[in-house]
């Protein structure tokens, strides 16, 4: 064991004195434990700082295939929606319906529906 000598402010000295008295141990022992505790905490923070990028990378690698799958599903849904939309327009035009006005009304209803609560939508089904 090595000997260290250092100075502390009066305030710190008073706190160490009070706390060591409460713990019924010498001031030097209390100070030694406090320093060791602080060093252990610093080691823990360094370990967390070292592990954080590793964990982030692992989560990103695990989530990547799922994100790509969802992106493909969303792209397919967008294509299917667009196809259905243009087929409907064709049918409406063949029936001599004003498609511009129908699209405006459908869009308004869609926006209202999307802004409403999910549970309200499910209850309507």
Image (cartoon, rainbow, N blue to C red):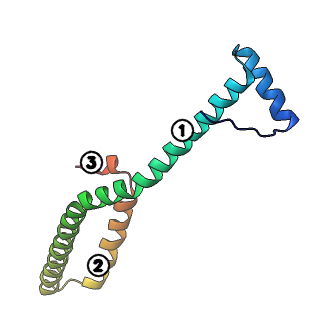
Q: Relative to the observer, which residue lies in front, 97 or 79?
A: 79
Q: Picture coordinates of residue 84 (x, y %)?
A: 15, 75
Check disc 3: other Cα within 10 Å, few if <14, some if 14-19, many if 20+: few
Give the left or right position of residue 65, taking residue 40 as reference. Answer: left
Mark closer to the observer (2, 3): 3
Front-most of 62 and 111? 62
Marks 1 and 2, Cα distance to the nearest angstrom? 66 Å
Q: Determine whether, in the image, residue 2 is placed left or right of residue 21.
A: left
- Which mark is drawn over residue 122? 3
Are the two marked residues, 1 and 2, in contact with CB atoms closer than 8 angstroms?
A: no
Q: Earlier in the sequence, mark 1 or mark 2?
A: 1
- Pointer 1 residue: 40
Whichever of callouts 2 and 3 sits on the residue coming sooner in the sequence is 2
Residue sitting at the far right: 10
Marks 2 and 3, how far apart in space?
Answer: 24 Å
Q: Is residue 12 left or right of residue 78?
A: right
Give the secondary structure at mark 1.
Answer: helix
Q: Residue furthest front?
A: 2
Location of the N terminus (image quadrant): top right
Q: Secondary structure at mark 3?
A: helix
Marking on residue 24: none
Among all residues in the image, which is located at the extreme top? 24
Task: Residue 14: give x, y in percent of width and height.
Answer: 84, 27
The 10 Å Cα crowd at callout 1, few under 14, some 14 to 19, many 20 or more, is few
**Looking at the picture, does residue 113 appear above or below residue 22?**
below
Q: Is residue 14 above or below residue 92?
A: above
The residue beneath circle 2 is 103
Q: Quadrant of residue 56?
A: bottom left
- Percent across and percent down for residue 107 are 33, 73
Q: Is residue 42 left or right of residue 91?
A: right
Which residue does the image show at 77% across and 27% down from the upper left? 16
């Amino acid at each position: 064991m090595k000997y260290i000598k250092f100075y502390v402010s009066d305030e710190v000295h008073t706190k160490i004195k009070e706390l060591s008295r409460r713990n019924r141990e010498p001031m030097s022992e209390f100070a030694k434990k406090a320093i060791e505790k602080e060093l252990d905490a610093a080691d823990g923070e360094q370990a967390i700082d070292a592990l954080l990028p590793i964990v982030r990378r692992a989560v990103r690698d695990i989530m990547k295939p799922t994100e790509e799958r969802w992106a493909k599903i969303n792209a397919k849904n967008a294509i299917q929606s667009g196809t259905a939309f243009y087929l409907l327009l064709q049918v409406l035009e063949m029936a001599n319906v004003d498609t511009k006005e129908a699209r405006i009304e459908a869009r308004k209803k869609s926006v209202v529906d999307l802004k409403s609560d999910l549970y309200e939508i499910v209850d309507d089904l």
